[in-house]
Image (cartoon, rainbow, N blue to C red):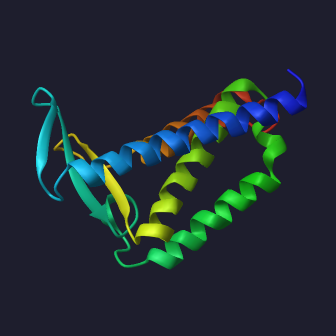
Amino acid sequence: MEKTNKILLFFAISAAVILTDQAVKFIVRHKLTEGVSVKAIGNVVYFTYVKNRGAAFGMFQGGRWILAAISLAVAIFMLFELKFFLINKPVLVGGALLFGGIIGNLLDRVFLGFVTDFIDFRFWPVFNIADSCIDIGLLIIVIYLLFYDKKNSFG
């Protein structure tokens, strides 16, 4: 795949993540009442609208601007190191998911002062689509670095 096409694919995936994340969060904020749970899939998945003013697991409550600055710094770093994410399709997809997730939550922090969370498994802190994309993207990249990248392998 040509470099230009890889770059376009990276940003297309990132944009899809951002748009989906923001659209669903908009619906959640306008259709659900904060703190009230609605069954989504049996007794397994609920939608519970939560305003997360911190980071993962609600840590760093009230750290809006510090968390926003860290997110922005990571996103800018990723853009400067974009060629790493173009080395193959799994890393490209992982990087695009990560970048899109970071920007999705950054938009919430900057414009709303909190991150909109809503996916609730009851045994795990409430999270959102951007959080899922960040986790999946990081997992893909870590698996690649640990098991498939021979020149940077730790094993």
Q: Residue, x 67% and y 35% (percent of image)?
A: 12
Q: Residue, x 32% and y 46% (percent of image)?
A: 27
Q: Position of residue 113 (x, y in %)?
A: 40, 72
Residue extending furthest toward the top: 1
Q: Residue, x 52% and y 77% (percent of image)?
A: 66
Instruction: Classify the position of the C terminus by image quarter.
Output: top right
Q: Is residue 62 left or right of residue 48?
A: right
Instruction: Classify the position of the N terminus by image quarter.
Output: top right
User: From where the camera sits, is residue 154 visible?
Assistant: no
Q: Is residue 5 above or below residue 122?
A: above
Q: Is residue 145 left or right of residue 64?
A: right
Q: Nearer the viewer, residue 89 or 68?
A: 68
- Tag count in the figure? 0
Q: Is residue 56 above or below residue 54?
A: above
Q: Position of residue 34 (x, y in %)?
A: 18, 59
Q: Position of residue 31 (x, y in %)?
A: 22, 48
Q: Nearer the viewer, residue 41 or 142?
A: 41
Please identify the quarter of the rendering in which residue 53 is found. bottom left
Q: Position of residue 25 (x, y in %)?
A: 37, 49
Q: Residue, x 11% and y 53% (percent of image)?
A: 36
Residue extending furthest toward the front: 30
User: From where the camera sits, is residue 30 visible?
Assistant: yes
Q: Nearer the viewer, residue 56 or 130?
A: 130
Q: Is residue 90 above or below residue 7?
A: above
Q: Nearer the viewer, residue 73 or 32?
A: 32
Q: Is residue 145 left or right of residue 62?
A: right
